[in-house]
Image (cartoon, rainbow, N blue to C red):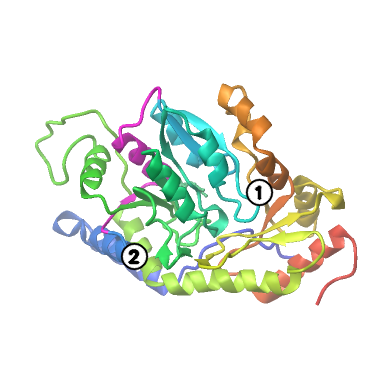
Amino acid sequence: MTLIPVAGPSITQLEIDYVADAAAHSWGDNANTYYERFHAAFSEYVGVRHAVSLPSCTSGLHLSLAALGIGPGDEVIVPDVTWIASVAPVRYVGATPVFCDIDPDTWCLSVDSFRECITERTKAVVPVEIYGSMPNWDALLRVAREHGISVVEDAAEAFGSQYGGKMAGSFGETGCFSFHGSKTVTTGEGGMLVTDDSDLFDRILFLRDHGRVPGDVSFVNAEVAFKYKMSAMQAAMGLAQVERAQELVKKKRTVFGWYRDRLEGVDGIFLNTEPEGVLNSYWMSTVILDPGFGLDKFDVIRELKARGIATRPFFSPLSSLPAFAASEQAKRASGRNIIGYRISRYGINLPSGLQLQETDVRRVCNALKEILGGTPWK
Ligand SMILES: *Cc1c(COP(=O)(O)O)cnc(C)c1O
């Protein structure tokens, strides 16, 4: 029995050719060619003015907070249910993370909870487009503007998603993407920061290269900062992936469609949503199971693994993790974030890789049905 992986990229001859070309030629006078092409193609796709490639999305979030001047004494609101990378940079700059609840349908930050978490110390919010889903951006941006709060968008999982015809990554003061091997667009490891704000972008370019302006070779650094770059070989791979963006997003939506055909409307199973005006790029096809089955996510994951199917748990609330649990903010959040605590316990990310075939999805759905009790579906 072959293992069905939970994720995986689509790599064609185009990626291989570009990477080989970069390895052979992207040096000296030619060192910047693939970066420039990648940045231009990416910013055009997202519909923003500026883009800069980075070693990770985590570094993009870190640079965003640092460039916005956020530091000790400031509070940054983050949804409680997300990957730890959304919040770790808040700690890197010495600020305090505040964990707000999530919305029961989109699984993104709840705007009501966001509003309730605002204090006079709140400087930024990090909305996360979880599994490709979009938050209620209209309401979210209205609240942020009313209170003068900066928006740092974590679009790591939402490459290609849209809200009201605008692309994921274009809503915040900055938008940050991940090109980790599991993501829709990959460079092995890597990330991208996008923004329309030219002053902020200049500050980010300065901070990401040890406190010097691009091209400076004086070695007279003005500040202690960071070194956040990817290689030209990675940029070459990223360029090929972005040139295939439509195809990659379409495949993600096809995979979700295969699951939806078999699981939608089944009692006790809830899938990713796509509200009116949203295009969900379904980085992960996800199910939330009714607690009535008497199985939590770790039980189901174990059973699926025994059947040769790799899955991942829905993120657990950050405020429940050993990394944060002792903090005052985590204690408050664990009592407050009822939706996040309820949903995250019963959520599973099903295999969603770009190589997946419909026969794989059928096998996953039949295994799930067997585990939950009953006969196989069509
Ligand atoms: C993958 C991911 C990140 C981090 O990306 P890296 O490139 O690994 O730093 C951040 N936020 C979310 C929501 C992610 O899924």
- The residue sitting at 57% across, 40% down in the picture is 113
Mark 2 crowd level (few <14, some 14–19, many ≥20, 10 Å Cα):
many
Give residue 355's position: percent from left, percent from top: 58, 69
Residue, far left: 218
> For the residue labelled by badge 2, is the local secondary structure a helix, a strand or a loop?
helix
Residue, far bottom: 378
Give residue 257's position: percent from left, percent from top: 64, 73
- The residue sitting at 76% across, 46% down in the picture is 298
Amino acid, disc 1: Phe
Q: Nearer the viewer, mark 1 or mark 2?
A: 1
Mark 1 crowd level (few <14, some 14–19, many ≥20, 10 Å Cα):
many
The span picked out in magenta is: 49-73
Label 1 lies in ligand 1 vicinity (Cβ under 8 Å): no
Q: Is residue 309 above or below residue 264?
A: above
Nearer to me, 10 or 198: 198
- The residue sitting at 60% across, 45% down in the picture is 102
On the picture, is 163 further left or further right than 41? right
Q: Which residue is mark 2?
A: 239
